[in-house]
Image (spheres, rainbow, N blue to C red):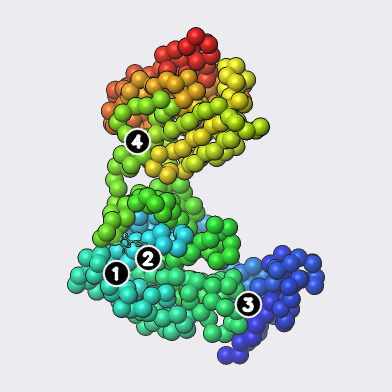
Amino acid sequence: MGRSSLYVCQTCGAQTRQFFGRCAACGSWNSLVEQVVTASDTRRRRPVASSAAAAGAGGGALGATDLPPRSRRSESIHTVGERPLQRLGSGYGELDRVLGGGLVPGSLVLVGGDPGIGKSTLLLQSAEAMAARHSVLYVSAEESAQQVKLRWRRLGGDGSQLQLLAETDLELVLQELESLRPAVAIIDSIQALHDGDLASAPGSVAQVRECAAALARIAKRQDTALLLVGHVTKEGMLAGPKVLEHLVDAVLTFEGDRFASHRLLRAVKNRFGATHELGVFEMRDRGLVEVTNPSELFLGSDEPSAGTATIVACEGTRALVVELQSLVSTTSYASPRRTATGIGTNRLHQILAVLEKHLGLPLSRFDCYLAVAGGLEVEEPAADLGVATAVVASYRDLTLPPGTVLVGELGLGGQLRPVGQLELRLQEAARLGFRRAVVPKGSGLGPMAAGIDLQLMEAGTVAEALVMALGVNPADDRA
Ligand code: TYD
Ligand code: MG
């Protein structure tokens, strides 16, 4: 089959036979990406309206071979046959939860994350667990078979039927997939695979996309669930996984602090389940262990201290009790320092401005540091009240009564806004032994709340909430 390369501009879709740093048609820089055109592709593509071919420039190579036969017509949605969605358990409850209940046959899942975070470990462990019940192929393109075996031993691998292939050549990987027809295949990593027909280096956008598209075709055809490992750089660009997001059914990110032992697995895209589900693991000397009670990780010391406050964050269907720490100290700079870890700095700025305006606290003369315990990233506004309380507690050198949690979003006018999933949050707090919760007024708790053993204090404004939480009025200078 004759194959040749074509460079397609990712901005305007223009095609050239030669690589240029700048697209001659639209003038954008570095937008040309190499694509393989096979002789059969060009023959098949020509009769189709050229507009379709041009519009498909993004995934052109993939779309072309997947065109349905020309005789096929649309049909009524009622006559479309329904197949119940099967799920293959991954062997890890936390991974299954993030996948929405397990792996779907024929689906493509991209597992992204920084190098060294534990992607290979996670997938080798679940490959081993799955191999007890299904045929599983683990393709290691980064490490030799020996290295994988050493790790497998260390992870406690034993007599499972796991098949291993250490190979970087896409062609050979595809052949193996075809002859083995496994239920699950793991490609570690997609950046290390190499399609010999492309001149680009392994890991380049063209290579990553071409390899993933070829793997996707075969996975769909033979109902193999494919797990692709992808390295993500801080920019999320260079290494390529970003270009795969539209092609795969689910994108999971594996993240964590290199210096902490816990790892968080999240779904950022999932065609077969909810996104923003969270799985928590801990890296031990013998691999990753599931953490079924993650709140314990994110709660600090038992001794309450000035400037700490406890919030309940929600990640998907899961509530996490998390401790916030704040330090407010007189600034010696012209513009005070504001540093936040685990919470957006802009959010912190906004909360400080609300406190300054509505409580009259002169926070612009103070440096302010805020940290979420355990290295968790909390994005939701429901953490606002906790941030405000931690800051004010540090500013006034106050300690919150033990067993208090704070939930609520701050409006710019100083009002406290209701947040979603309040019952879930309160249940988790009560389960962990918290006794008081300051929540927004009019939260409309359902009947479930009746069974929650917590003293609820409802506040309409941040000023009211702070009085309830701290027991004194922080705006009062004698406090
Ligand atoms: P790895 O799975 O190789 O990361 P990735 O595939 O994402 O690049 O994990 C690498 C780190 O995990 C490495 O720094 C060592 C650590 N590790 C453990 O702490 N315990 C273990 O049992 C294993 C296998 C790895
Ligand atoms: Mg690896």
Q: Residue furthest bottom?
A: 1
Q: Which quadrant holds residue 24?
A: bottom right
Nearer the observer, 39 or 391: 391
Q: Disc 4 vs disc 2: which is toward the camera?
A: 4
Q: Which residue is mark 2?
A: 120
357 left or right, relative to 456: right
Residue pointed to by mark 4: 300
The amino acid beneath tag 1 is: Arg
Report how far apart the C-alphas of labels 3 and 2 lie in the structure.
29 Å
User: What secondary structure is marked by label 2?
Assistant: helix
Q: Secondary structure at mark 4?
A: loop
- Extreme residue toward the left, this view: 159
Q: Is mark 1 within 8 Å of ligand 1?
A: yes
Q: Is residue 78 above or below residue 174?
A: above
Quadrant of ligand 2 in image: bottom left
Q: Counting residues from the N terminus, which is met first, the one under dot 3 or under dot 2?
A: 3
- Asked if one can make out residue 280 in the rendered structure from this viewpoint, the answer is yes
Circles 4 and 2, Cβ within 8 Å, touching? The answer is: no
Q: Residue at x 46, y 59 (%)?
A: 113
Residue 147 coordinates in the image, percent (x, y): 32, 75
